[in-house]
Amino acid sequence: MRDISLSAPGKNSLKVKVAIHSDDTLALAVRYWPKGSRDSVTETAFSATSESPSQVLTNLQPGRTYAYQLVTRRGTCTSAGKEYEFKSQQLPLWAQDQFRLVCPDPGILPAAFRDGYFLVYRRDLPGLIYLLDAKGNIRWYHQVNGTGVKMATFTPQQTILALLGDETYQTSYGNELLEINLSGDTLLHLKKGRDFQQTLHHEVLPYKDRLITISSEEKVMNLSKRGGGKADTVKTDGILVMDRSGKTLWHWTIFDVLDPLQDPAIAKEKSDWMHANSLQVDKDGNYLLSFYNNGQIWKIDAQSGKVIWKFGKGGDYTLAGGDWFDNSHAAHINAQGNLMLFDNGTKRLQSHVLSYRLDEATKVATLAFDVPLPKDVYSERMGSAYLINDTTVLSTCTKRNTVVLTNLQGRFLWALRSNASPYRVEFIPKEKLFPFLTH
């Protein structure tokens, strides 16, 4: 081995790249730990074999001294070198006051919650993706210059898949798809106009070898019978399924199944007809698409595009007790097998988390639980809610820049307040981030 070099990739305070230069081909792993805490060792996997192998160290705290040891492998022979030291950088000033935690009694938090992490992102420029611990500390971040992160999700492959959009794209609309690993390497980067043609919004899902998104769709129509013009543009939504190169594999639009002229208010609603805001894959592989404007969730056949059922006011289901939702976000099948959603609650001016048991054969729905959120975090638009366990739920109240943990009776347990408006905050159990982040 000729020499060792250390650098901060992307000027990132919480990452250190260790590279070595050798006269021979070898693979590199790095063991590292806070100085004086040898029992808190983090070890990377081995790199690919090279004359200049490298590793990015991620499990760092700002402004702390670390000891590290290089482990090299030539063929079947592995050897560990002597110990060295480095000091991590302080967080940049702009990151030091981004989040504020409110937690009256940490002892009542679920153990998995206390040990887990949270995926948060900034939609304004510059785009930022954070991983926080339950104390509100920034444990990992990634910056994307010149564009905002409109939504992001953590994948089973320990990567982050994100929809990006610059300041010409409003709210949750974007024109780029980016996937990075936790070392910060770009694994996928697709752009509108080069790799795909539609504007995307609100959703990008990894599913098998595909990317599933909500797309923006337009159609010029004669709306004079509904009080509009003879050549009005109706803007609505669709589902776009792509391979990882951006090639279209399946494309569906609301125009395929519903005639805008059937809507008496289409002249008024033409600029944002229906407004789809979340998309999920159901247990049987079909799609669940939620709409803000008409207060419904549709199940759509992933092969034929046929609408299997509509759930909500004016839909196909009868509700056996409980209330319908007003406007939904983040509709999904939860760990209990029920349809769960964030109800913005625009009529009662209070957001709720609702879960419904669906009998798809009889089209009867039963309310499984109704969690009233604190009135001071009412979010009339946007938001999400996900179970942490059978007794607690994590809700993102976007319009109040707040994420709250409550029990199923709505009792406040924990809150994270952000300087930016978090669209959805996703909880990630600690085991899914090992070994990149550990306590």
Image (cartoon, grey):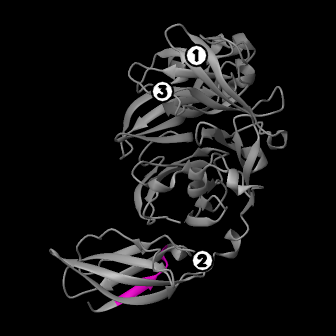
> Which dot, 2 or 1, sits closer to the camera?
2
Tell me residue 128's x, y (percent): 60, 61
Closer-to-camera residue (301/49): 49
The number of callouts visible is 3
Q: Residue at x 74, y 34 (%)?
A: 409
Tell me residue 63's x, y (percent): 60, 81
Mark 2 or mark 1, which has the lower sequence index? 2
Specify the quadrant that holds the N terminus. bottom left
Instruction: Inspect the image, locate mark 2, and give the three-letter code of the amino acid beneath it.
Output: Pro
Left or right: 4 as drawn, with respect to 227 = left
Marks 3 and 1, Cα distance to the nearest angstrom? 12 Å
Closer-to-camera residue (340/276): 340
Q: Residue at x 39, y 80 (%)?
A: 18
- The residue wearing badge 3 is 287
Q: Residue at x 84, y 32 (%)?
A: 349
- The residue wearing badge 1 is 310
Tell me residue 158's x, y (percent): 42, 54
Q: Secondary structure at mark 1?
A: strand
Instruction: Inspect the image, locate mark 3, and give the three-letter code of the amino acid beneath it.
Output: Tyr
Marks 3 and 2, Cα distance to the nearest angstrom? 42 Å
Q: Secondary structure at mark 3?
A: strand
- The residue wearing badge 2 is 62
What is the quadrant of residue 264 in the picture? Answer: top right
Mark 3 or mark 2, which has the lower sequence index? 2
What residue range appears in magenta? Answer: 4-9
Left or right: 288 as drawn, with respect to 236 = left
Instruction: Inspect the image, locate mark 1, and give the three-letter code of the amino acid beneath it.
Output: Lys
Left or right: 278 as drawn, with respect to 226 = left
> In the image, which disc is placed on residue 220?
none
Badge 1 local density, few (<14 within 10 Å), some, or many (20+)? some
Q: Is residue 194 magenta?
A: no
